[in-house]
Amino acid sequence: AVEVVIPRAFLLWLLLVAEAASAADPKVRLYSRSRRPGEAVLVVVTGHDPARPPSGTFGGAPLYFWPASKGTYLSIAGIDLDVSTGTSRFELKLRRPQGPERPWREAVKVRPKTYTTRKLAVAPQYVEPGPELEARADEESARLKALFAKATEGSPMDGRFRMPIKGAKTTSRFGERSEFNGQARSPHSGADIKASTGTPVLAPQAGTVVLVEDLYFPGKTLLLDHGAGVY
């Protein structure tokens, strides 16, 4: 849902900064397009102990770091679509080479963002499923939540993320609000891409397939783990 690209010049800058900062306390820099619900924040830590990655949370959710170069670590902090606007906090634990662990904290202001609302007419069972279907949907939702809570080692930044279908256009946007038969539903946490039957669909980035299943609400689902908590 969010495309994050790190230019080569930026990676070279990270290498130079890492060397210069090796004897100082670790430094933290935050990069984002905006600080609004549905956006991502790139967290860059330099001058850190290369033998042990940083740890921490953003808004109470864990952050997963991966090495970009010696002593330099990256992480992606997502600002949830349902997060309340106001202040969210970064809480990190940092360690310089052969030094003690120390806390790092910073509050960021999350500004409001307005998403469009789409109104759809769907079959009644997708608005008010019976007890059996509702139990199935709840079980599937719990399994997806458990998968998303796991973070495997590795970098999700192995090149540029690409569209699964070359040249295709999206028919809905990430974050859109939906009304099914007049009833409000959860925000759209993906993007719909229109294509004809039989069109090849490519993985947007290298990853491991962790789920292939026909789920009740999402439909036919293939879930890719790109590493470091990015799916």
Image: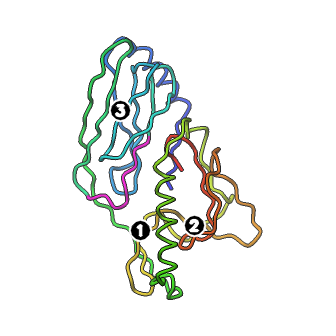
Q: Give, as a single range, the part of the protein colored magenta.
A: 76-84
Determine whether 98 is above or below 137 in the image: above
> Residue 156 vs residue 37: left or right?
right
> Residue 4 vs residue 82: left or right?
right
Determine whether 52 is above or below 228 in the image: above
> Residue 111 vs residue 137: left or right?
left
Residue under label 1: 187
Judge by depth and name the residue closer to the eye, 102 or 179: 102
Give the residue drawn at x 44%, y 14%.
19
The answer to whether marks 3 and 2 mark residues whose Cβ atoms lie closer than 8 Å is no
Residue under label 3: 29
Q: In this view, which residue lies farthest toward the right?
A: 198
Q: Amino acid at mark 2?
A: Thr
Residue under label 2: 170
Residue 77 on the magenta segment: yes
Q: Amino acid at mark 1?
A: Pro
Query: From mark 3 to mark 1, how far is it between C-alphas?
Result: 30 Å
SS label for mark 3: strand
Q: How is colour applied across the structure in the image?
A: rainbow
Give the residue drawn at x 40%, y 24%.
46
Judge by depth and name the residue closer to the eye, 220 or 118: 220
Judge by depth and name the residue closer to the eye, 159 or 189: 189
